Image (spheres, rainbow, N blue to C red):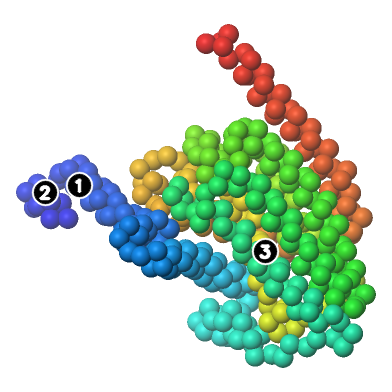
């Protein structure tokens, strides 16, 4: 900044030099800021303990355990905070769409409302139905919540920031996400309630139906990348995001994501007009809160997966220096927030589908279209690979 003032004092009309110096100072400032953020992030995810080679075996194991705990907390704590304030974002957005104010009482602009809701659920009494299977009844929300958390182990937040970077990350995602139906089935069966059991059956049929379409869409992306590693999928979009050449797959994946997370207009397992509250009708207090947190964590997970497969993950929209100054995990957060906004908007804008319409879309519309599009994309890839040597 001193150079800018000196240039203006010597020649007040030298705006060109002032302009260049100003942008140079801004570039240096943002580079320093980026290095601070990236340094903090890498410290959490890639801190190498130098004492491992000089300390005893017991001390080294304790240090490795401490490193794993820190990395777990670096994922879980921001995720839980984001989930809590996603509920506030949803209520605010739906209030604006429906010409209401939304939460405004607890804290400034209602910012403390998620904390008040969590405290209220924590202080309430957990009621177990008299004829319910108590062990399975209490275990099912825990299973649903844990499964929604452990899926985040393979999600890369930037090029060097993932809890584990495995070569079969896509297979891990599909395997763990398909287990989520067990928590819902356990809750519906153990509650000894017709409403809860019907909601659980609906959820199982819905998840299985739309997981097939999601799997075929993911196969289309994998055919273009040639790798099951999530980091490789993001890096392959360095020049163009897959949302542009694979736009039909993107639309089917977004709509199937709504059904996979039991969100409106596909929230048939929780249809209050038919099933009171669905599979969680008998739950209260913290057991209900665990289902609630698991659902919103699954929403954020679907947003992250959509960002990785179609929106370039942590990559900026344009590869220019001013965008590259922003850390990758911030770009990832912006894209996930935009997808969550889409989820909330669809809930406020569209009415709930009938159950037969939901099944028809999954089996008679998305499944044949996704299979046809997959064969078309693979055919294009094979055709270009065969013709490439002759073109060269």
Q: How many marks?
A: 3
Task: Work out how far the residue at label 3 is from the one at label 1, CA to CA, in angstroms.
Answer: 52 Å
Task: Work out how far the residue at label 1 is from the one at label 2, CA to CA, in angstroms.
Answer: 9 Å
Q: Residue at x 72, y 78 (%)?
A: 288
Label 1 vs label 2, nearer the camera? 1
Q: Residues within 10 Å of mark 1 (few under 14, many from 20)?
A: some
On the image, numbered disc 2 is attached to which residue? Answer: 7
Q: Which structural element holds mark 2?
A: helix
Circle nearer the N terminus (2, 3): 2
Circle nearer the N terminus (1, 2): 2
Label 2 vs label 3, nearer the camera? 3
Specify whether 315 is left or right of 208. left
Residue 82: image location, x then y, percent = 55, 68
Name the residue furthest left: 10
Name above or below for residue 132 compared with residue 14.
Answer: below
On the image, numbered disc 1 is attached to which residue? Answer: 21
Q: Residue at x 63, y 77 (%)?
A: 102
Residue 147 circle label = 3
Name the residue furthest top: 390
Q: Residue at x 17, y 55 (%)?
A: 1
């Amino acid at each position: 900044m001193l150079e800018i003032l000196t240039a203006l004092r010597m020649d007040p009309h030298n705006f060109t030099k002032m302009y260049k110096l100003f942008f140079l100072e801004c570039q240096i400032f943002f580079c320093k800021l980026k290095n601070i953020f990236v340094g903090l992030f890498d410290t959490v995810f890639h801190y190498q303990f130098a004492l491992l080679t000089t300390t005893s075996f017991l001390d080294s194991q304790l240090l490795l355990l401490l490193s794993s705990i820190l990395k777990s907390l670096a994922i879980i704590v921001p995720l839980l905070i984001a989930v809590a304030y996603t509920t506030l974002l949803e209520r605010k957005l739906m209030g604006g769409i429906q010409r209401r104010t939304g939460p405004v009482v607890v804290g400034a602009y209602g910012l403390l409302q998620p904390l008040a809701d969590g405290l209220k659920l924590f202080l309430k009494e957990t009621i177990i139905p008299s004829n319910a299977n108590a062990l399975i009844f209490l275990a099912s929300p825990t299973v649903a919540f844990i499964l929604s958390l452990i899926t985040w182990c393979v999600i890369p937040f930037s090029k060097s920031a993932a809890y584990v970077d495995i070569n079969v990350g896509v297979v891990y995602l599909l395997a763990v996400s398909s287990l989520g139906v067990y928590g819902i089935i356990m809750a519906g069966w153990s509650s000894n309630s017709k409403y809860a059991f019907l909601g659980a059956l609906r959820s199982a049929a819905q998840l299985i139906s739309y997981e097939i379409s999601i799997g075929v869409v993911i196969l289309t992306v994998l055919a273009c990348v040639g790798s099951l590693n999530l980091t490789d999928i993001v890096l392959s979009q360095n020049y163009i995001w897959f949302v542009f050449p694979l736009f039909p797959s993107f639309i089917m994946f977004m709509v199937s994501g709504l059904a996979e997370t039991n969100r409106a207009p596909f929230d048939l397992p929780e249809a209050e007009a038919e099933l009171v509250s669905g599979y969680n009708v008998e739950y209260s207090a913290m057991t209900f809160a665990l289902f609630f947190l698991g659902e919103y964590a699954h929403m954020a997970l679907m947003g992250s997966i959509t960002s990785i497969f179609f929106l370039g993950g942590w990559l900026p929209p344009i590869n220019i220096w001013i965008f590259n100054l922003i850390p990758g995990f911030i770009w990832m957060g912006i894209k996930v927030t935009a997808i969550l906004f889409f989820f909330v908007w669809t809930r406020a804008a569209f009415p709930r589908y009938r159950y037969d319409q939901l099944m028809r879309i999954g089996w008679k519309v998305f499944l044949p279209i996704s299979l046809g599009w997959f064969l078309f994309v693979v055919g294009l890839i094979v055709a270009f690979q065969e013709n490439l040597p002759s073109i060269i």
